[in-house]
Image (cartoon, helix red, strand yellow):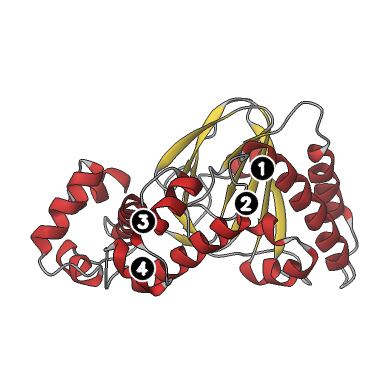
Amino acid sequence: MTLQEIPNIEFNSKKAYNSGIDILTIESLANRKDSIEDHHPEKAHQVTFNMIVYYTSGESQQLVDFVWYPVKQNTIIHLSKGQINAFQFTEGLTGYILLFTEEFLKKQINSLPKNEIIRLFNAHLFSPSIQVPEDSNVLQYFQLFYEEYSTIKEDYNQNSIYASLHAIIFSKLEGLKQDQTFYLKSTEKVTTFLNFKSLLEVHFNKSRNADFYAKKLNITYKHLNEICKATLDVTAKQFIDAFVILEAKRLLINSEIKSTELAYHLGFEEPTNFIKYFKKHTEFTPNTFKKNYI
């Protein structure tokens, strides 16, 4: 792998009639980790699909967007399209990896309550880690999905079964996530926050000023801060900075872009300003960060 390139992993199913969903075991991936041609699963890579990992035994950690999360029996890690991932395979580590494309998820949206999408696949709102209680039956549905996927006859009807099991798993996980995110009571505040995030995704390279986004939302700067505090316990400016830094990190390790080019791309007038900004929030220069992660 060259210094400037991190693998961008595409969804690739061996099923002839697959509609965008797949499942495999953690141990099968660990067994073939050194023979995979396009990437090594224990090194940082970016996923172009959604992923739910259920750990059934063992202890280890998993990288999600440059943070290592501890995992053990009954830990679930979920990632959205575009996030950075890496596994750490240890002896006795087992479980399931459920993969599905953005297109598959969009088809499922009509059968899933909106809150499920928000809770499970909004990286800025929630931790990617869930600890499943001992009395939960979520694992049974992962096992059933794996059995169906491994043994079912290759025909078009299999997709209806996959969609139904996916909806059940998703709903089960949303219930667990709801229990672990008790502070999000106000739907109105969450909706406004998500609108703020959507604006930031479009305009982050034009403005890092919280007042700019408050005006676009037709609310005051104070109100936007209150919403961010209630939702994530950070100020609007802190959220903007975290968003820009994460975007910078992803671009740094997933392209040949130089720090100077990246500075202009992110809306900085001078490259030196970007380097100072990046170091203030990460304690690394962009180049040092890139070397460390690749």
Cα distance between the residues tagged 4 and 3: 12 Å
**Comes first in the chain, label 3 or label 2:** 2
Which residue shows up at 60% across the image and 52% down it?
186
- Which circle, 1 or 3, is nearer the viewer? 3
Q: Amino acid at mark 4?
A: Tyr
Cα distance between the residues tagged 4 and 1: 29 Å
Q: Amino acid at mark 1?
A: Lys
**Comes first in the chain, label 4 or label 3:** 4
Residue 43's mark? none
Which residue shows up at 42% across the image and 67% down it?
219
Residue receiving disc 1: 177
**Comes first in the chain, label 4 or label 1:** 1
Cα distance between the residues tagged 2 and 4: 23 Å
Determine crowd level at label 4: few under 14, some 14-19, many 20+ residues with C-alpha closer than 10 A: many
Q: Amino acid at mark 2?
A: Arg
Determine crowd level at label 1: few under 14, some 14-19, many 20+ residues with C-alpha closer than 10 A: many
Q: In the image, is residue 261 above or below residue 98?
A: below
**Comes first in the chain, label 1 or label 3:** 1
- Disc 1 and disc 3 in contact, CB within 8 angstroms: no
Which residue shows up at 21% across the image and 51% down it?
278
Residue 213's mark? 4
- Which circle, 4 or 1, is nearer the viewer? 4
Residue 119's mark? 2
Residue 111 placement: quadrant: bottom right
